[in-house]
Image (cartoon, rainbow, N blue to C red):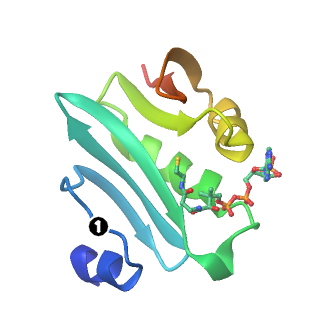
Amino acid sequence: MNLRFYFRRLHVKIKHKPTVLVMRPEGVAMIRVQYDIPYFSIYVNKPYRGQGYSIKLLEELFEKCRGKYDAIFGTICIDNNQMRYICRKLGFKKVGEFNNRYLMMKKLS
Ligand SMILES: CC(C)(COP(=O)(O)OP(=O)(O)OC[C@H]1O[C@@H](n2cnc3c(N)ncnc32)[C@H](O)[C@@H]1OP(=O)(O)O)[C@@H](O)C(=O)NCCC(=O)NCCS
């Protein structure tokens, strides 16, 4: 399925074209590069939530990123305990803090 159509259906706007993408019926994980920095994002479709798909999709995404990026970044809300847990489990470290958000980094090399 076309990505733009997929997101329109979910009422999610994509502002930057993904450079690395994992798209499954369960959800989407992607890397978007802004100012040369690769950021991940994750969306699990509602019927599939609570079954560990976020971690599976992200692991697959990071595998695809090996050799392409030295590190992956993400920004998460400080009060989002679930994303904090997911990032920690996937090996992210907190490298900054701004506007009630943590900047997280995972080294790939
Ligand atoms: C956030 C989101 C990606 C989670 O996806 P998911 O596949 O449903 O995640 P799961 O429910 O399987 O949980 C993943 C892990 O978080 C843990 N977890 C769940 N709720 C938690 C909480 N409140 N605090 C800490 N950990 C929590 C689970 O136990 C699980 O850990 P485990 O694999 O070690 O058992 C999904 O809800 C989503 O797409 N939300 C909308 C988009 C979004 O918010 N994206 C993130 C933007 S930063």
Residue identified by numbered label 1: 13
The crowd level at tag 1 (other Cα within 10 Å; few <14, some 14-19, many 20+) is: few
Residue 19: x %, y % from top left: 22, 49
Residue 33: x %, y % from top left: 22, 39
Q: Is residue 43 left or right of residue 79?
A: left
Circle 1 SS class = loop
Identify the residue at the far front of this view: 99
Residue at x 45%, y 41% (from the top left corner): 62
Residue at x 26%, y 83% (from the top left corner): 5
| Figure quadrant of residue 88 | top right
Residue 11: x %, y % from top left: 38, 78
Residue type pointed to by label 1: Lys
Q: Is residue 79 left or right of residue 103?
A: right
Residue 4: x %, y % from top left: 23, 75
| Figure quadrant of residue 13 | bottom left
Q: Quadrant of the N terminus?
A: bottom left
Q: Where is 78 relative to 64, above or below? A: above
Q: Where is 65 relative to 3, above or below? A: above
Q: Quadrant of ligand 1?
A: bottom right
Counting the numbered discs, the total is 1
Q: Is residue 5 left or right of residue 45?
A: left
